[in-house]
Image (cartoon, helix red, strand yellow):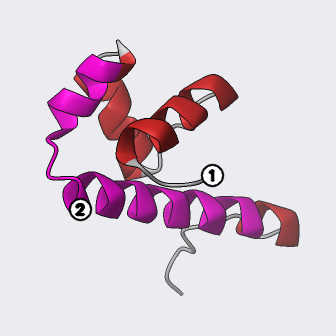
Amino acid sequence: MAERPCGPRKHEQFDCWSMIKFAERLKEARKASGLKQSEVAEHLKIAVRSYQYYEGGRRRPDYETLVELADFLGVTT
């Protein structure tokens, strides 16, 4: 049996899938804006690797960073 990418509990599964969806939408918004990962990271004043973790679903931005991302990319939260 293949390993599930999300936890076995219902709330863990929702959390995992919501992170995956967030990461996908973040990447789509950045590409639609014609920006590179490094340009977004520079605007946020974070390391490129940290931003890559957001797009990869490995890390979540804090609330202030999320709002700044949305403003910068021209999307809503």
| Disc 1, SS | loop
The location of residue 75, given as percent across then percent down, is 48, 54
Find the magenta span and give its range.
Answer: 14-43
| Disc number for residue 77 | 1
* Identity, as a three-letter code, of the amino acid under mark 1: Thr
Q: Residue at x 30, y 21 (%)?
A: 43
Given residues 59 and 45, the one toward you in this image is 45
The location of residue 36, given as percent across then percent down, is: 14, 41
Locate residue 13, reporting x and y percent.
Answer: 73, 69
**64 in the magenta segment:** no
Using the image, determine if residue 39 lies above or below residue 6. above
**Badges 2 and 1: C-beta atoms under 8 Å apart?**
no
Which badge, 2 or 1, comes first in the chain's sequence?
2
Q: Position of residue 31 (x, y in %)?
A: 21, 58
Report the residue at 57% width, 54% height from top.
Answer: 76
> Residue 18 lies in magenta, yes or no?
yes
Instruction: Determine which residue is flagged by label 2.
Output: 32
- Identify the amino acid type marked 2: Ala
Task: Find residue 5 and name its label.
Answer: none
Direction from residue 38 to residue 57 in the image, left or right: right
